[in-house]
Image: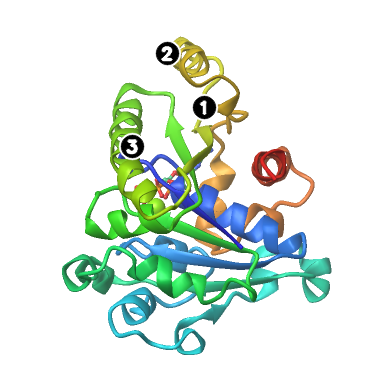
Amino acid sequence: MKIITLLNEKGGVGKTTVATHIAAGLAIRGNRVILVDADPQGHATIAFGLSKEPGFYDLIVRNAPFQDVLRPVPPEKFNVPDEAKDTKGQLLLVPSNIETRSIAGNISDAFTVLKRFTQLRNAIDYIIFDTSPTPSLLHSSIYMATDGIIYPTKCEAWSFDGLRESFNHKDQFSPIRQQYNLSDIRVLGIVPTMFRKKTLEHQDNLRRLRETFGDLVWKPLPVRTIWAEVASARRTVFSLAPGTATEADAWGLVDQLEAQIYEHE
Ligand SMILES: Nc1ncnc2c1ncn2[C@@H]1O[C@H](COP(=O)(O)OP(=O)(O)OP(=O)(O)O)[C@@H](O)[C@H]1O
Ligand SMILES: [Mg+2]
């Protein structure tokens, strides 16, 4: 089981979009996947047309059993309509609502998130955390639980600032993870999102990103209206826009993640 977190302390950079599509793509490819909506905004929950509810809060604070909080995402919401009924894997969601904000104030043990999810070690292939842009003690607990992080970012100054702050916070957890014999958190990728290839500012910033992070920078996701359309339709591009360039971009995310994971196994 791998635990992977989408993070950037700048809002609106594509964390939820990338989280939902990676989770869906891995499930279509036959994996058992749990997407954890760790953001009180509940966007990963409504992304699939499910109801906002305190699933994550109940799991972490009330110690609720997994079967009470996990919500199966119907395959027709995330897979190609013709192939939905034959979907090989499974996508389950831990939903969120505003009560997720209260989790930080109600956990005294930084290992609560880790302990809860390692109970699923043999039943699940991937756990994907979608996080809020505002750092909190809940983020600390996720830093103790995660194996790797993917950082979506716009190629713009304030998103880069969010990225820097996020890297600093990750690094602060290295000593404590070492103390508990946990390996360092792996940076799995930096995803340039909403990229405008004809805009000089974006080109320059992408170059700077590549100079700093080299091969960790994934292929940019071009800005495209279809991403907003799939959010409105409560579906994924796999389900709503098969055969389009955007669907290929979304598979590119899953391919790059799998390449990173296999490379280090
Ligand atoms: N490549 C893209 N092109 C155009 N629009 C996009 C693209 N990726 C995401 N979007 C849209 O941008 C908006 C913000 O994306 P998203 O909600 O995924 O960001 P976020 O980082 O999760 O935001 P928050 O920090 O509020 O949680 C959404 O409306 C989404 O549909
Ligand atoms: Mg989000």
**Residue 180 sits in which quadrant?**
bottom left
Which disc number belongs to residue 171? 3
Q: Residue furthest left?
A: 105
Q: Comparing marks 2 and 3, which lies closer to the viewer?
A: 3
SS under mark 3:
helix
Q: Earlier in the sequence, mark 1 or mark 3?
A: 3
Q: Which residue is mark 1?
A: 195
Location of residue 249 (image quadrant): top right
Q: Residue at x 30, y 64 (%)?
A: 40
Picture coordinates of residue 211, whole percent (x, y): 50, 12
Which residue type does callout 2 highlight?
Glu
- For marks 1 and 2 on the same chain, the one whose residue lies earlier in the sequence: 1
Measured in 3D between alpha carbons, the distance from the residue under mark 1 to the one under mark 3, in whole angstroms, is 27 Å
Query: Looking at the image, which residue is at 43% across and 78% down?
Result: 51
At x 50%, y 51%, the residue is 147
Cα–Cα gap, marks 2 and 3: 29 Å
List x then y, in percent, for residue 200: 47, 10
Q: In the displayed structure, would residue 54 be above or below residue 140?
A: below
